[in-house]
Image: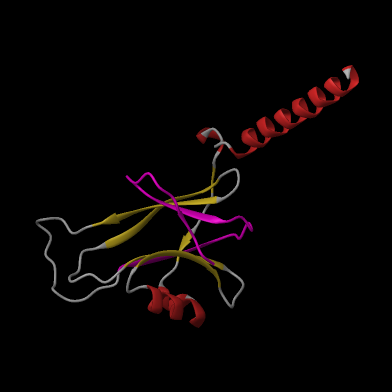
Amino acid sequence: MNKKSILIFIVLLSLLSACSSATENTSPADPSEYKEIAFERVSLENTPNDIQLSVNVKGIEESTFGLLGSDGKLYVIVTRGEKASTGYEVIIKKVEHRVDHIAVIFEYKDPAEDEEIKNTLTYPSTVITFENTGLPIRFKQLGERSWIDAFQ
């Protein structure tokens, strides 16, 4: 009976140890450890046809996604959806390599009250490219708390 109790204790101890180490690995890293990734803004006209088609299809709604283009490059796109006037923008603020994903931080800019705008349908979007790390891409809009997972 004594050996059985010791064996159960050892098994429970090892299970608790495994749980605590798994939690440590998935907890967020210290923001000072995030590595900023250089990215390049690309005009839609300078992307492969498959990327242009995806943006044209998905650009009518707000969306975030990453795609491998037919040229082998990774393209990350944030679209704002259909807007009734000019003056709306999508701005990628930074791209960071985090512990288990790539973070794309962006913001939406609305026209200023005193800005001259034209009443015409627009589809604001931004396309960037950077080195493919193989990690999942997650998006975060400035001022929002939740993350958006990219579909690829």
The image quadrant that residue 71 belongs to is bottom right
Left or right, 133 with respect to 67, comes to: right
Coordinates of residue 101 in the picture (x, y in percent): 57, 50
- 6 to 37, vertically: above or below: above
- 68 to 113, vertically: above or below: below
**Quadrant for the C terminus in the image:** bottom right
Q: Residue furthest front?
A: 1
Coordinates of residue 2 in the picture (x, y in percent): 88, 17
Q: Is residue 135 magenta?
A: yes
**Magenta segment, which residues?**
124-152
At 20% from the left and 64% from the top, the residue drawn is: 87
Residue nearer the viewer, 146 or 82: 146
The image quadrant that residue 18 belongs to is top right
**Quadrant for the N terminus in the image:** top right
Q: How many labels does the image show?
A: 0
Q: Does the magenta stretch include residue 77?
A: no
Could one spot residue 105 in this view of the protein?
yes
Residue nearer the viewer, 123 or 129: 123
- 8 to 67, vertically: above or below: above
At 60% from the left and 47% from the top, the residue drawn is: 100
Coordinates of residue 79 in the picture (x, y in percent): 36, 66
Coordinates of residue 139 in the picture (x, y in percent): 45, 54
Q: What is the basis of the colouring in this image?
A: secondary structure
At 56% from the left and 74% from the top, the residue drawn is: 69
Left or right, 124 with respect to 21, comes to: left
Left or right, 36 with respect to 44, comes to: right
At 68% from the left and 32% from the top, the residue drawn is: 21
Could one spot residue 76 in this view of the protein?
no
Q: Which residue lies furthest to the top in this view?
A: 2
- 43 to 139, vertically: above or below: below
Left or right, 101 with respect to 54, comes to: right
